Image (tube, coloured by chain):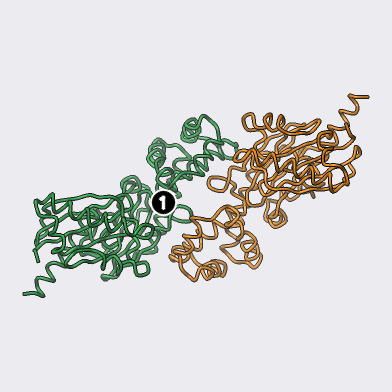
Chain colours: A orange, B green
């Protein structure tokens, strides 16, 4: 048993790991391929372990140290069925803890405090910690959810551009720009939309915010709809004494100014990122084990 | 050269044909597989011809008569690129005319009169004939269009059911019923939504209307949104002297009561169906040829 803790952020676009000593000082970092445990458990396990080995190598430690560390792995789906237990059993760590991506995000942003976080990237999801208890909403994917996600902003832009093309609704500089990207041909817009993945739609999110800042009426309408969705999700999770709201993800900064005043007043900078949250938790587990062993 | 006219409705779920004499009396009918010319031209051509042969057989005529008739084939995509010409060349009819599905639908519903039609099934699309000129809008598919389609009603129901599950919005008897169909498990709703085809979502459209009639607030909100989309599309196509609006498709009757009064006042029963429109046009072409030959 070494006195090392490894935190792992097992994400759909890649795994990131960091190894720290017993006081939380980060000694090395590693990366590996994606972890999508619900769709590809085997490769997810390989990538989780590989990111940990990389972090150990980066710290100048032998890769086999991996079997002697305390580790926290945060992955989406850890709370679905028996996936958490199955991963826990398959991993080589001395003391492994598989938790949800939500928990490490909360820990990273809020530390040990209560509060609410909303994450806005390709998707959108909300989590609260109140009196230490977690509650998550959203994150159902852009087809029937994720109303404030980048994917929905992009899909909305395409829909409104086609309505403008048909002259059902007014056009705007933004819809004109979108249509011109497809040679003014609505069939090409539709062809794109029917094969686009969430991240392809989400590519348009920065453009929507850019035009909204330039007073484009359709851009403003799209952003206001999404911000209203954020407000109603936050209202669902908030309680009167809630100390803070942290917005995370690539679109967090862009959404800030569009939120209701009651929410703006509670906005706080996240203390650390998701990986930091995993490291913090791993260090806590290490300290508990050391206490237990003492 | 015989004095026969064949009308063919080449649809995505199947081809239907009817053979008529020079005065429009239908002598026989036939069916065959689907025509999706943009995605599968070869099989579409086979099915179009097969439906015509079936109609001739049904009328007690030899199948080789197919090379001696005037025919009108209505298919979606006939106006895209050179598809119309390519189909025209490949078909065996003495005198073939490939036209859009919109034209045969207009002809069927309105005869030779001006007016506006809206079709509401799995998708939604609008067409107008004004002073003999056609204009069509909508029909872009449910991902970024078809706001009043069965597919969108179903998708909307799933989205609102998940919002109710998360307690972001109130639930209703309809959302409770939807969730119970999936064992109360939002993951299963999402799994369905991410593999569902438009017709799978559209399965829920009758349920939405059924609950709207029972004053279910969420059902009413979904139907009102869709009806508002119909109203704004109709307003885009209407002109002051427009004599009639015909609603077509499986959801036509259900939508009637939800439209704006100004549109209800113009509603008229369609004169005939889409296949009838194809037959009417084929008979016209036959009569023109006969005049030319006389």
Left or right of residue A127, residue B37 in this image: left
Residue A53, relative to residue B52: is it above or below? Answer: above
Quadrant where the image shows the C terminus of chain B = bottom left
- State the image coordinates of residue B157 (x, y, percent, origin top left): 48, 41
Left or right of residue A96, residue B119 in this image: left
Left or right of residue A68, residue B144 in this image: left
Q: Residue at x 62, y 42 (%)?
A: A138
Total numbered circles: 1
Q: Which residue is mark 1?
A: B148
Residue that protrudes farthest toward the left in the picture: B294
Quadrant where the image shows the N terminus of chain B = bottom left
- State the image coordinates of residue B145 (x, y, percent, origin top left): 45, 56
- State the image coordinates of residue A159 (x, y, percent, origin top left): 50, 58
Q: Nearer the viewer, residue A202 or A285?
A: A285
Left or right of residue A147, residue B3 in this image: left
Q: Nearer the viewer, residue B276 or A2?
A: A2
Few, some or many residues within 10 Å of mark 1 (<14, 14–19, 20+): many
Q: Residue at x 62, y 59 (%)?
A: A205
Q: Residue at x 65, y 42 (%)?
A: A43
Residue A153, relative to residue A3: is it above or below? Answer: below
- State the image coordinates of residue B177 (x, y, percent, origin top left): 47, 32
Task: For mark 1, name the chain.
Answer: B
Which quarter of the picture shows residue A99?
A: top right
Question: Which structural element holds mark 1?
Answer: loop
């Amino acid at each position: 048993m070494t006195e090392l803790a490894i935190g792992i952020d097992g994400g759909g676009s890649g795994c990131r790991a960091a190894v720290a000593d017993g006081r939380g000082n980060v000694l090395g970092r590693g990366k590996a391929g994606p972890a999508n445990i619900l769709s590809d458990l085997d490769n997810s396990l390989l990538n989780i372990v590989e990111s940990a080995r990389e972090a150990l190598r980066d710290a100048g430690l032998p890769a086999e140290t991996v079997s002697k560390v305390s580790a926290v792995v945060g992955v989406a789906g850890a709370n679905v069925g028996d996936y958490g237990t199955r991963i826990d059993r398959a991993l080589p760590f001395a003391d492994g803890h598989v938790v949800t991506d939500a928990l490490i995000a909360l820990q990273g942003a809020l530390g040990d405090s209560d509060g609410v976080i909303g994450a806005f990237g390709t998707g959108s999801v909300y989590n609260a910690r109140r009196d230490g208890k977690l509650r998550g909403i959203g994150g159902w994917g852009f087809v029937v959810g994720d109303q404030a996600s980048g994917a929905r902003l992009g899909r909305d832009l395409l829909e409104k551009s086609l309505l403008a093309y048909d002259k059902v609704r007014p056009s705007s500089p933004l819809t004109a720009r979108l249509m011109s990207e497809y040679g003014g041909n609505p069939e090409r817009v539709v062809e794109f939309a029917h094969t686009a993945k969430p991240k392809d739609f989400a590519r348009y999110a920065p453009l929507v915010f850019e035009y909204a800042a330039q007073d484009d009426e359709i851009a403003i309408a799209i952003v206001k709809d999404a911000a209203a969705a954020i407000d109603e999700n936050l209202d669902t999770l908030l309680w009167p004494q809630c100390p803070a709201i942290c917005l995370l993800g690539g679109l967090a900064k862009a959404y800030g100014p569009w939120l209701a005043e009651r929410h703006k007043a509670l906005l706080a900078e996240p203390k650390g990122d998701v990986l930091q949250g995993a490291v913090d938790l791993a260090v806590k587990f290490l300290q508990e084990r050391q206490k237990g062993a003492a």
